[in-house]
Amino acid sequence: MANLHINTILEKMTGKDKDYRYMATSDLLNELNKDSFKPDADLDIKLSNIVLHQLDDVAGDVSALAVKCLAPLVRKISEPRVVEMTNKLCNKLLHGKDQHRDIASIALKTIISELPTPSLAHSILLSLSPQLINGITAPGMGPEIKCECLDILCDVLHKFGNLMASEHELLLSALLSQLNSNQASVRKKTVSCIASLSSSLSDDLLARATVEVVKNLTSKGTKSELIRTNIQMIGALSRAVGYRFGPHLGDTIPVLINYCVSASENDEELREYSLQALESFLLRCPRDISSYCGEILHLTLEYLSYDPNFTDNMEEDTDDENHEEDEDDESVNEYTDDEDVSWKVRRAAAKCLAAVIVSRPEMLAKLYEEACPKLIDRFKEREENVKMDVFNTFIELLRQTGNVTKGQIDMNESSPRWLLKQEVPKIVKSINRQLREKSIKTKVGAFSMLKELVVVLPDCLADHIGSLIPGIEKALNEKSSTSNLKIEALVFTRLVLSSHSPPVFHPYIKALSNAVLSAVSERYYKVTAEALRVCGELVRVVRPSVEGSGFDFKPFVHPIYDAIMSRLTNQDQDQEVKECAISCMGLVISTFGDNLRAELPACLPVLVDRMGNEITRLTAVKAFSVIAASPLRIDLSCVLGHVISELTAFLRKANRALRQATLGTLNSLVVAYGDQIGPAAYEVIIVELSTLISDSDLHMTALALELCCTLMADKRSRPIIGSAVRHIVLPQALTLIKSPLLQGQALLALRKFFSALVDSANTSFDSLLESLLSSAKASPQSGGVAKQALHSIAQCVAVLCLTAGDQECSSTVKMLTDILKDDSATNSAKQHLALLCLGEIGRRKDLSSHVHIETIIIESFQSPFEEIKSAASYALGNIAVGNLSKYLPFILDQIDNQQKKQYLLLHSLKEVIVRQSVDKAEFQESSVEKILNLLFNHCESEEEGVRNVVAECLGKIALIEPVKLIPALKVRTTSPAAFTRATVVTAVKYSIVERPEKIDEIIYPEISSFLMLIKDHDRHVRRAAVLALSTFAHNKPNLIKGLLPELLPLLYDQTIVKQELIRTVDLGPFKHVVDDGLELRKAAFECVDTLLDSCLDQVNPSSFIVPYLKSGLDDHYDVKMPCHLILSKLADKCPSAVLAVLDSLVDPLQKTINFKPKQDAVKQEVDRNEDMIRSALRAIASLNRISGGDCSLKLKNLMSEISKSPTLWDKYYSIRNE
């Protein structure tokens, strides 16, 4: 039936009426697009013949529809038919009439783009390639035919280049011969064709192509247009094959530089193409081009100002700020010459310089010396497109400076930021001249540069604000300014206002505020929104503090208020503007409220109204938080009740951000206006906030408990609130305290809550204590209580006792010691909690009045339960913190005399030292000596646990007494005992914390003596040094940057598998291989991972990736995981270095994802292997994100292998969308 219908359509397609033919062809297209349509053998032949026939239809619209039919047709008919069709079309293209050639070419391209299977593609290529090669090389073929053949061949090679490996040599010979064609169009298409072919060529054929092109360039007498083509060819080759072009740079770069320098004056295109090729080398072959970078830099700087037809008389910079200069500036640009294309050379030089900046972070200091002045000088470029490229190059320089110096605080004279700071006056002077230009594009570019400058050096414009104000005014006020320019100017103004100190702007506030307020009333919403954000910063600058700064802010209060109020009350505007107006009004009221008393009754109800609107309520809640926190105590009496009831209702909403903001705002309002809010309102709030207390959202819990404490602090309504909290919130708190997840801010808030609760009226201390202690009892439903929960309970008990007073505290301590004395107590959980409670109370309060408490605790060291021993050691240490003079000597004495209890006693000592280092407390001189002697005696202990505790103790004492400790530790780096050397390096690791400490400057000169132990002969010492380096890199990278050139090769050496550390253990029936170097290799790779985050400018990725990372990707499971992470980071941060060796990295990844565990593998091994495959796929996904990664044939093949395996593809797909 279906075939009958098709036959009818086919008959109509051959009719004489072109409208009939058109409609029939359209019907055929619809039929072909149906999934259910499947033609038989006869219909196959008919369809292919008729569509080919329609392609030559005299009516253009019919032949266009026939081309559309080809795409679905190719997928529906048999392979021989498709091959036959392509042969006919190819014949028509090569030998047919001129008018049919175009349509045949389009038809062939359509078929090639739609080929459904590789086997069909292979069949077609076998017959198509020879005909296309013939069309390109046969003597009688016209240039039009050659161009069409090259176009089609380019498509074929791009899509199926790797299927044609057997014909690569023939194709390459045919195409290379066309590079010397007399027709420019043929040469141009040949260049793109060879580029498409090159990505699938073998290294030998690629070398042959390069040699041929270089030979064309170096042979005497080559025509200049052929030289240009061959230079374009080199650039296209490097863009197509990426890093694989690296080995040929030695032959090509000198030739290109020579042509650039020696080309005749009017051969600008030759220079442009040479610079474009060099730019491609810089981005694609970073490892191989290192030795030429200096030469290329000088070349780009020379051609950045290449303008042979124009002499610039404006060289003598005048510092005149007159605006009459505008006319002069214009007269400079009046010179035009349509023949002059030297601007192309300048543009190519700017882009090439940008490539140097992006790909060579290590050259930054040199770039500031040589390139920065030249770039600033070229801001005066007369060709606008080139000027934009100069601006973009300078922005790249600023961004690279920001990337390299991220997290660095000190600015020494070789630091890129210091070098940039020296150039700021010149930059500002040059940009000011650009801001007086008439061109909008130039001004937008100038503001973009200023924006980046402020981001990289936040306070660098303090001395230049006055000179920049006219440019900002002009951009915001001139009628010719576009929205884009206004937005750029406003964003820059906002950044500059927020990053500089307020007094800098005070002389210019009038001019600035007028310009910004005029932008607030703009019609385009994005300008208005940005202007309102600037207003917010302006408010802070106008009145930085309530006390007053000697600047009269009053004249600006009402203009700012009026401008924002008009936006706030306007209903029909964009949501972004509404939100900005609400935020800004919140700032205005909190800053100027004392000068707006008359306006508040009109303004505050509008803000309350915005709280009722779902779209703006979150912003309005935050605005009220700002108002409530104002030191001016704004009078909110007219709206306070309404606001409180709205906010209380918001605590029930599903929107988490809204609940969070509401809790913060309620807290601020209760603190500031508690005396105006009634107890009834408080009770409703307590009921609502009790539902938010749970361990599923600890941040919300902390905010809810803080609000609860604030409510209980209100003395007037304490009795009512106390009982409400006891009945509603306390049960939730007692459930929360049992959570093993409880920590941080939520635990702190819970401690405050119990402290506030025992303080409030009608709450019995005994019942609270009882409920806390009983929450530690194991219930039959939930089983035992988590260890973390016992610590939380102990902390809350301690806070409760201290708040209740000495008497309650003493009775509690007595009760707890009785639990410990009670020998018959088999309840280990009870004893465990009692010890923890004693420790927490003892840390906060001196317990020396309780006689022999220390001996009672030490008795628990004999317990058969490990957790009780550990709790006893914790308790002893913390009690010692409460009274050092009494208990510290006792602990030290016990360590000397009790060999069996040494490890636990050292843990007690560690508690004491860690607490002292956190609290910045000092030890007595004699105590320090005793402690040090004792610790150094235990450095060589056989037990690793003891050595680790000793190292942590030494590290934390070093924070308190660095002057004494650092020399003592340094002396022991040369100790003959390996354990001692490892312990002192580990101690240094513990002394390096994130916050600034006085140890930093004392240890700085001595760091190398510790870290150089990375080349020690003992592996334990080497590992300790690697871990210490990791900690330095994470917490204090600036301390080690100078040592990295020496340390990195040593660190990389630790990543190699050392055969001497691999031993075989004979276990009788089977042998077991033990790799003692595994932990060291893992630590070394993890250290590199940390260094990539903090010291990227010091790590040379190219020298690390091969061979070290490559071998790590093929190592043990524990080493592969960090290597995958490193590879992902490098792909993101240094893509060009990864591209340069991409092929060699694919093999180990492929091996990892194809690894199958043994049949009898246990579940743990199977799970580990699954994790490993996911980790490798994550690395592969990051490799795919690199632009230019498609040059790698191996990566393409790996991706096709992944896509064919359903399990791998599902994993890969979910990882890619994470």
Image: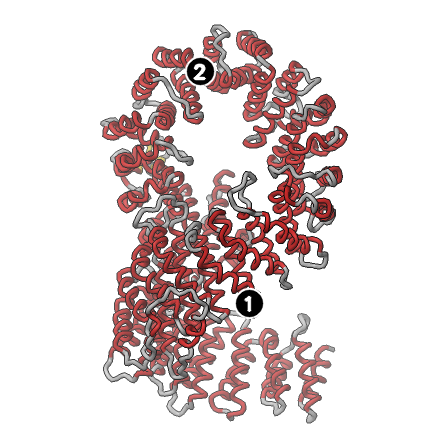
Residue 379: percent from left, percent from top: 39, 67
Which residue, as the protein is rendered here, is positioned at the far right? Answer: 680
Q: Quadrant of residue 48?
A: bottom right
Q: Is residue 175 above or below residue 723?
A: below
Q: What residue type is disc 1 on?
A: Glu
Residue occupying the point 26% across, 65% down: 295
User: Helix, strand or loop at disc 2?
Assistant: helix
Q: Amino acid at mark 2?
A: Ala
**Which corner quadrant holds the N terminus?**
bottom right
If you read the primary sequence from the N terminus, does the residue marked by circle 2 or circle 1 appear first?
1
How many labels, in total?
Answer: 2
The residue sitting at 63% across, 90% down in the picture is: 59
**Quadrant hosting residue 983:** top left
Q: Residue 900: which disc? A: none
Tell which of 905 and 1207 is nearer to you: 905
Residue 900 sits above or below residue 1067 on the image: above
Q: CB atoms at circles 2 and 1 under 8 Å apart? A: no
Which is more foreground, mark 2 or mark 1? 1
Q: Position of residue 270 (x, y in %)?
A: 33, 78
Instruction: Give the x, y percent position of residue 863.
Output: 48, 13
Which residue is denoted by mark 2 in the rendering? 880
Q: Position of residue 649 (x, y in %)?
A: 74, 39
For the residues labelled 2 and 1, the Cα–Cα distance comes to 73 Å
Residue at 64% across / 32% down in the picture? 671
Q: Residue at x 44, y 27 (%)?
A: 918
Mark 1, secondary structure of its residue: loop
The answer to whether residue 147 is above or below residue 562 is below
The residue wearing badge 1 is 478
